[in-house]
Every structure is written in structure tokens, then in C-alpha cells.
Amino acid sequence: MLDIIQPYLDYFTVHPEWALVIIFLIAMGEALLIIGLFVPSTAVLVGAGVLVGTGHLGFWPVVTVTAVGCIVGDQISYWAGRLFGQRLKTMWPLHLYPQLVAKGEDFVRQHGGKSIAIGRFVPGVKSVVPGIVGMFGMNQLFFVFVNVTSGIVWAFAHVVPGVLIGRGLAFAGELSGRLLVVLLVLLVLLALAGYVIRLAAAGVSPFLNHLLARVSAWARARRGRSWQRFARAVSPGNPRSVMIVLFAAILFTGLVALANLAIRAASSDAVSNIDVSLATLMRESRNAPADELMTVITMMGDTIVLSALALAILVWLVWHKAYRAAWAAGIAIVAAKAFELAMKLGIQRARPTELSYSGASLFSFPSGHATMAAVIFGILAVLVSHSMGRWGRALVYATCAILAVAIAYSRLYLGAHWLSDVLAGLTFGVVMMAAFGVAIEAIPPRRIKPHGLFATALVVFLGAGALHVATGFTRASEMYAVQDPLTLVPVAQWIDKDWEKLPARRIDLAGKPEESFIAQFAGNLDLLAAQLEAGGWSATPEWTWGQSLPYLNPNAALPDLAPRPALHEGLKAKLTLTRAAAGDGEGREVIRIYKTGLAATEGTAYKPIYLVSLTREVRTHGFDLYAIPSPRPASAADIADLRGVLSRAGGIAILSGHERGGIRQDLITASP
């Protein structure tokens, strides 16, 4: 991904004039009549600020062309209003948006001359206000004054946040190139999502209403009471028709995401690096208090507890004669369980750790806890929030989502599932919730008393969960206890071939290979640390987030900065040591030693096998806002020196390096 993005960044750095032309056209287009509804100005202009913050564009040129563009666009819209007057409302494209024009006229009447400045920051009306004030005959000089001053403010308001984001991305990029790409992709996705929402909320409303009107007419022409109810539900005059469209969009998106996850799981012989890294990180983070809490949470998602919750929902619906809703909920729950069992038996992916399950539950993909929790709590949220207002609906969905996500997270923490298992379960749950939501919004149930349903469901869920935890916690604690992943191999076997099974490079949390490991070592870390400290190395405390605070001091010296965090398959280094670079070298040398899942045995004794990396770090800073250590490759002399220490450390070391694409192995054996 970085290879794809970097050429564009380099091009705009070398040819900033083209970037400025694009920024000008976007800023101008955003201010033109109606056209501004469809121009992703905020995303592009904030993105331009990001490029400023990352050092690819200049600040003042970007602010200048942004301000000039929006001023020119508003001036053109004003002239259109002055030239055509009231006829403008009957011309294309304004005649497609009578409600928006009427709203803009009311806005101008309410705020007068201030509407030009205020309207720039109000979605929807900002695309018609300049034309309307021109249509109303506002004085040209007054318009120019307000247009120019407010345009300058608007430009700063869009570019400056992007600059701050860009500087934050530059900081993240110093810590990890992959982190920078992930954040950039996330920002792009958020920008696209905001643009789509903006179109749905304002730009495509006439087309959406036209489509809903046609669907409603088609359904009304069919016989049957259900079709007539559906026709009334999707009619543009029904305020609930928007929810139907929203659920349908979620349904489609979820199906695409679910298909992608399932295809990847079915076609791959091994889980991804991201799955492995996160599972390893979770295993390394486990502790007794958190184990107890997560065991309780995961038990709340066991089949017996969720079955009691589902039964309570169905009985409530039947009791209140909401038979259609009961049938729809029952079908969704049964379909979710069938999906879970079919996928487990079809893909047969092994769990991260062996658990005392049987049958289909032996397998991992998808997470049954995540699937059923998302489906049942999703159905409950749809039913309860159906007749509520915006804030009540948000509260119900937030409560149900927190419960489902907590159960899903507990499965990751306890090592019962891979990340992709949990994502697949949650995605399918959201799909079933959306399908159920379409049915409920189209044919709403009557007399279900949602507040009573919500209270009853939560009481049953908590009661069944408490009883289940009280009777089965000891057994569950034993099943989810941390398992020792250490695999014992004879020393000779490790020396002969098993050393090749271990990674040649460090794998970061996102699955990207980083620096090469210069050695594999089996021995006592305390003895090795003593040997290294005698040679001038200093051990550093295990890295925590608190150690990153000095990074925010741009004047901090390198010795004041903790070595950069560097995980291997989700694991922190068991031992990190530093020393000043030898000779006239710049910066400092950093040794990181990571534990593996292998141990070398000889007789009845065994020693864990570790991977050893060596890098050089130098101090870098960005925009005088922060200072962080950045990695550089270790020199050949540094590597040779460290290998010499390993050879005298009282263990067994396999020293490996990459030469001409192959692996060179030098075996050094000391007392085992």
C-alpha cells in the first residue's frame, strides 16, 4: 500500500502546482449552486492539509488557493442569482430541489447578510445561499466584503485541522511505516463514508424519493394486505422509509464483507499474520484478575444463556400477539445457528488453543459466541428501538452493541478464537439484524410494549448468566486457563532443521516483516544480560505507553527516549538493551530478544529458544513537535561484535544472516 501511495506523494512534492489546481477547483466547485452538494470538499481540503502536515505541500499556497477558490465559487453563484432572479428557481438543477431552495430562502430571511458567512458552514444550504442572496438583490460591495472575509476563515477552518492530522500521521509514520498506511487508509474510508452520507442526506434525496415512490407504486399494484403494508412503509411520505433503506444498505455491505472473510478462511491453509500476531499479543497480556473477568463475560455468551435470552424475546412477542415479528426473529436465530454450524464443519479451522469442545464446536470459524450474541442482541435492539426517538434508539443500540462486543472480545482474550473468526461472527450478526430490521420497518409489529420487552430481556439475560456462572465458573476457568505453548525439540533437531521453521525477520502487529534476526539463542537470559552489561550494554525496562510521553518533547536527547516499541508477532521483547554507537557512529545500538514457542532439550534439561535482533537508532524530530528514535540497519561490525558475545554466553547460538537470497548458518556451541 505504501508503494502505491508514495509515487503520488512524490509527484505532488515535485509538481505542487497540480495539487494547487485540484484544490482550487474543489474549493470553487463546493461553492457553486447545487453542484456543491456533490463535491467532496471537506475530505479533499482536509486531505490537502494532511499533505501540508506531512511536508509534501506548502501551508500558505494551499490556504491561498482554497480561499480564492471558495470566494470565486460564491461570486459566480451570486452573479447567477442577480442575472436570472426568481427564474433561477425554475431552471435546472434548482428545480429538482424545491425544498432545499425554500430552506435556503428561509435561512437568508432569518440571518440577512450574516447568512453568507454562516451558510458556508451549514451543510445543504451553503450550496444555494449565494445564489439566493443574489436573487434577493443584495448589494455587490457588501457581498464581496462578507464573501472575502468569511472565505478566508473557511479556508483556515478546513486546512488547519488537516495540518494537525498530517503532523500526527508524520509522528505515527516515524514509529511505524505500516501504522502510517493504516491511518491513511482509515482516513480515506472515513472521508468516503462521510461523502456517501452527505449524498444520501442531501444530494440524492430527489432520486431516492423517486426510487422509493416507484417501489411503493409497484408494491401497491400487487394484491395482498402484506404488499399494501409494504407499499405504505417504503412510501416517501413515510418517515420510516429511510430506516428501511439504511438497513438494506447495511445488509448489502455486510454480505460483501462476510463473503470476503469466508472465502479467505476457506481458501487459506493457515491463518493470517494479523490473526497470529493479535492472538500472541492477547496471550502475552493475560493476567489473573482479567482472566476471571473475561471468563465471566464469555460465559454470558454461552449457548445456554443466549438461548434463555432468545426464548424470552420470542415468548414476549407471542404473548403480545406479534406473531409476524416472532416468526421473523425465530427464523433469524435459527438461520444464525445453522450458518455457524455449517461454516465450522465446512472450513474446520483449528482454534488458537485447544479447548475441551466436541463436535462442530471443535472448530474456530466463525465464533459462535460472537455470531449469536450479535444476532440476538441485534434483534432485541431493532424491536425495542422501533418506536423510539433518535436518542432513545441510540441508547438501546449502544447498550446491545456493548454487550455483544464485550462477549466477542472475551473470545479473543481467552484465546478461543482468531480475530477473523470474531469479525465473521459479528458481521453475520449485523447482516441478520439488518434483514430483520427491514422486515420490522416494512411491517411494524403492534402492541409489543418495547420498554417492558427490554427490561424483561435484560433481567432474563442477567439472571440466566448469573446462575450459569455460579454453577460452572470453576470448570470454565480450568478450560480457559493459560496453556504453555512451549514445544520441546532435541538440540540436534533444532540445529539440523528446526531453526529454519522460526521467522527470519521480525513480524510487526500488522503482519509486515521488519528487520532480520541475526541469531537464535537457547540459554539463560540472565547470564546473557550479565555478559552484555559487562560489555557496556544497559538493560531497559519493559516498554509501556507511559514511556512514549518523552517523545512529545522536541528537545529531548536520545538517551532520554526509550527505545521504540517493536513487537514480534504481538510479543514484547523479553530483554532490551542499549549502548552508545561504537566509534564515531551516530545514535545508539539496540538489542531486542524475543521468546519463541520452541525450547531446546538435552536429556531432562531444556532451555527456551530466543530470536535476537540488532538495530541502530538515531534521534529524529518532526515540525519541532516531537522527537523519537528511528531505526537504522546495524553495521557489520556491530553484528560481528554481538555474535561474539553470544558465542561466549553459556548457551547454544545459531547465527544466521541473509546472503544472496539464501541463509548462511554458523553454529557455535557452548555448554548446554
Image (cartoon, helix red, strand yellow):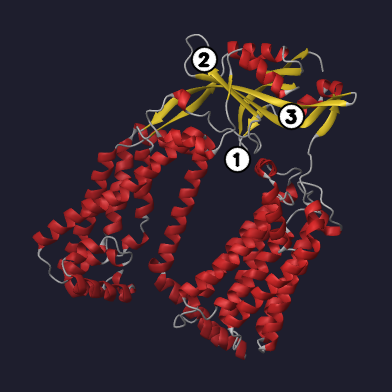
Label 1: element kind: loop
Task: Tell me if mark 3 has few (under 14), some (14-19) or many (20+) residues whose alpha carbon lies within 10 angstroms of its own.
Answer: some
Q: Amino acid at mark 1?
A: Ala
Amino acid of disc 3: Leu
Q: Quadrant of the C terminus?
A: top right
**Image-based side of 309 in relation to 251, left or right:** right
Instruction: Describe residue 576's horizontal placement relative to residue 28 as left or right.
Output: right
Residue type at numbered disc 2: Ala
Q: Residue 339: horizontal and vertical position, in percent?
A: 75, 64
Q: Earlier in the sequence, mark 3 or mark 2?
A: 3
Label 3 and label 2: CA atoms lie apart by 29 Å
x, y percent for residue 446: 59, 88
Question: Which residue sits at x=61%, y=77%?
Answer: 454
235 is higher (above) or lower (below) than 186: below
Q: Residue at x 49, y 52 (%)?
A: 189
Counting residues from the start of the chain, the first of labels 1 and 2 encountered is 1
Secondary structure found at label 3: loop
The mark closer to the camera, 1 or 2, is 2
Q: Residues within 10 Å of mark 1 (few under 14, many from 20)?
A: some
Left or right relative to 555: residue 393: right
Q: Are marks 1 and 2 in contact (CB under 8 Å)?
A: no
User: Which numbered marker is on residue 581?
Assistant: 2
Classify 10 Å Cα crowding around label 2: few (below 14), some (14-19), many (20 and above).
some
**Disc marking residue 510:** 1
Residue 596: tell me if it is visible.
Answer: yes
Q: Residue 315, labelled with which disc?
A: none
Q: CA distance from mark 1 to mark 3?
A: 18 Å
Q: CA distance from mark 1 to mark 2?
A: 30 Å
Which residue lies under the disc numbered 3?
502
Q: Earlier in the sequence, mark 1 or mark 3?
A: 3
Q: Position of residue 652 (x, y in %)?
A: 77, 18
